[in-house]
Amino acid sequence: MKLAGKVLVAQGGGPTAVINQSLVGAVLESRKFPQITQVYGAINGVNGIINENFIDLTQETTHNLEQIAVTPSSALGSTRDKPDEAYCLEIFRMMQAHEIRYFFYIGGNDSADTVRIVNAYAEKSDYEFRAIHIPKTIDNDLLVNDHTPGYGSAAKFVAQAFTGVDLDNRALPGVYIGVVMGRDAGFLTAASSLAKKYHDDGPHLIYLPERKFSLDSFLSDVKNTLSQYGRCVAAVSEGISDHEGTPIATKVMNTIEKDAHGNVSLSGGGLGDLLARYVKEQLEAGRVRSDTFGYLQRSFPLAVSSVDQSEAREVGEKAAQFAIWYDADGSVTIHRSGDYSVDYQLTTLEKVARHTKHMPDHFINQEGNHVTDAFKNYARPLVGSLPYVARLRAPVVEKKLT
Amino acid sequence: MKLAGKVLVAQGGGPTAVINQSLVGAVLESRKFPQITQVYGAINGVNGIINENFIDLTQETTHNLEQIAVTPSSALGSTRDKPDEAYCLEIFRMMQAHEIRYFFYIGGNDSADTVRIVNAYAEKSDYEFRAIHIPKTIDNDLLVNDHTPGYGSAAKFVAQAFTGVDLDNRALPGVYIGVVMGRDAGFLTAASSLAKKYHDDGPHLIYLPERKFSLDSFLSDVKNTLSQYGRCVAAVSEGISDHEGTPIATKVMNTIEKDAHGNVSLSGGGLGDLLARYVKEQLEAGRVRSDTFGYLQRSFPLAVSSVDQSEAREVGEKAAQFAIWYDADGSVTIHRSGDYSVDYQLTTLEKVARHTKHMPDHFINQEGNHVTDAFKNYARPLVGSLPYVARLRAPVVEKKLT
């Protein structure tokens, strides 16, 4: 017998440029099934569920939903709440009160864990219930998945940003340090490598959280690059830490601020400014600049990867299909099935919840200061086309006076 | 009699997303005239002239020049050298040695001044010589001009960035401060206003260098915005200063670094971090974040305004036409001739050199914390189309438990 009732969709964690594609995919696919009585959206993720802040997406127009799909950030709003057992019980109580039978939560590994706990309550209570986690994170750090929706577009922003700043640095040479998001996983920082076209293009150096960061090695890398190219562009992950595991960023923060997940906040210009000051003092380099790309990375409207957009849409649709056609619970996962194509599978929530995936060793070079071609082959199809850049190739004029 | 000889083109100051359009416009137009024997490019602006680093752009392909035109940053390289009289005399000696009869320098008001001085040496020496300044600056601060090439594209980046971060802030409410380039003129920061679509969209507050900045007023503005919208997005110019004229940025910099123009360097996260910390402490606001947009603003490949591209191309072409057809010296200036259309004129170098244009009073609101509709009408055609963003409008579901 088909399970009749309502669908509830919510968005959690940090927004991305394509998370609304997943929302719209799940909503439109759910609306096709006659046993689905209504499709609700929770305002501000799980926080909206426990506060009963729902909107009825069955009454939203298809046209507006398609416009929402191409709008960056989370249209339902998001939350940094990390539910404990009591919080999840509250979520479950709300589900029962509203006769919600299908729950689709779009988010990272914390969101997968929430889905897992809520689903466990439903099973214990013999309440017929289907719960699916829909993957999303610009960090690309979910296990089982080849990659995650949101990553390709953020990576495209980072690659384009480095294309631009490298051309800028070529025109006005010096040292440039760009700090990229990614607390534990270096995938996003690694995407800066796609900005390299000519052999002497930047980023010349790439530092990832997967390798211990030493200020001495960094300094000698910068020095070598300067002597080779007369300039140096470095991509640095905000999450780099020293041999003791202490984030380099925390060394310069006056106030260590922790978010609800117990994570130290790494936003702000601290790390980049520290590294720039250090290089300037130690190398007596003239022009040293740093930028922290910050929130622009995850919501810039025009940096969207079309592959990422399509896949974000499909994981939303697949969630509805797995739950409503197949009566299944789990996390939708993306698997590379060709060069380039993907398949979607349903994986148990336990395998995705809470864990973090890191850059594999063969994506990082021996010296730990750049990526390999294997990484570029991996990332290129996810990011898609990048802007063409050209160089003058005119012959040099003979000198007359000097 | 037609003045026969070589053309020399150079690019100065900070790169922009469209400065190569001006280069290519000047080169291709110059190559049409039979009296032009060769078209040289100076590597790294005036620094390349005194060091005799020239390339022969007559031998560059038209195809590659067209690819260069759509590549951001200065393809010839740039310089921060600010020539004094002796330096300009050296420039002039090089012009004579290479029989350069036409000099086109693409840059801001400092570059215009260099052209003025070099031209004065030529006049004094009875050396037949035409010198044209081609306008360029993302700051939009050149006198006589309605606006300057480079501004529209940087403004488009800023508007899009605020569209994105405002959607992000709407999903995860708090206070967000975005620091925008612009030492003395607020035009670029003001462009953030184009990100507003709905009445409660950010930026809710905009602070420009044209108005004295007070931390107290800022705090009370943020407080009011928070109580009205539950969140606050502010756009702040890097150049804001207090009632004594002291840049707010310098108050937090450990090292005050001055560039070759005697300007204090305002790059780095200092100002944004200071303001964020201040708001956090004073208002006990939960989530306070800041980003300094930095170098991304002037070289991001995909944020280009098509109007800006066309005009940057045309000022380059007009420079060649004014000099070669009309035997004239001066600065090419842009004048708005319709809504929206422009004309190009030649203005004396003295009127553009060294001076800085500011935001006029009627572009700034009474409170000094936002812009007027007059500014938006001014800026919109320069920036061109911006991404469409949508909001969910589904009805709210009645609560059952709370």
Image (spheres, coloured by chain):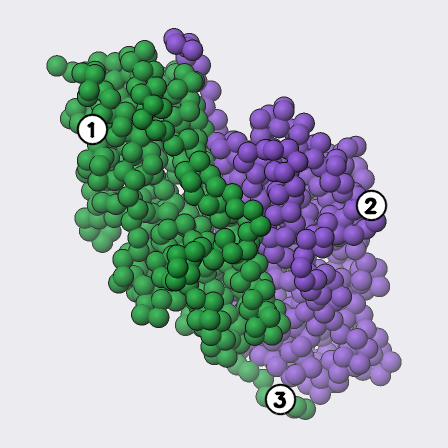
Chain colours: A purple, B green
Whole-number angstrom distance, CA of label 1 to CA of label 3: 74 Å
In the displayed image of the protein, which residue is found farthest to the front? B244
Tag count = 3
**In the rendered structure, the residue with mark 3 lies on which chain?**
B
* Amino acid type, residue under disc 2 in the picture: His
Q: Which residue carries the number 3 mark? A: B399
Q: Nearer the viewer, residue B261 or A399?
A: B261
Task: Name the element at disc 1.
Answer: loop
Q: Nearer the viewer, residue B122 or B346?
A: B122
Q: Quadrant of the C terminus of chain A?
A: top left
Whole-number angstrom distance, CA of label 3 to CA of label 2: 52 Å
Rendered location of residue B273, percent (x, y): 57, 58
Left or right side of A370 for A38: left
State the mark number for residue A243. 2
Task: Name the element at disc 2.
Answer: loop
Whole-number angstrom distance, CA of label 2 to CA of label 1: 62 Å
Nearest-to-viewer mark from 1 and 3: 1
Task: Name the element at disc 3.
Answer: loop
Q: Quadrant of the N terminus of chain A?
A: bottom right
Quarter of the view holding residue A198: top right
* Amino acid type, residue under disc 1 in the picture: Asp
Identify which residue is drawn at 43% across, 33% down.
B80
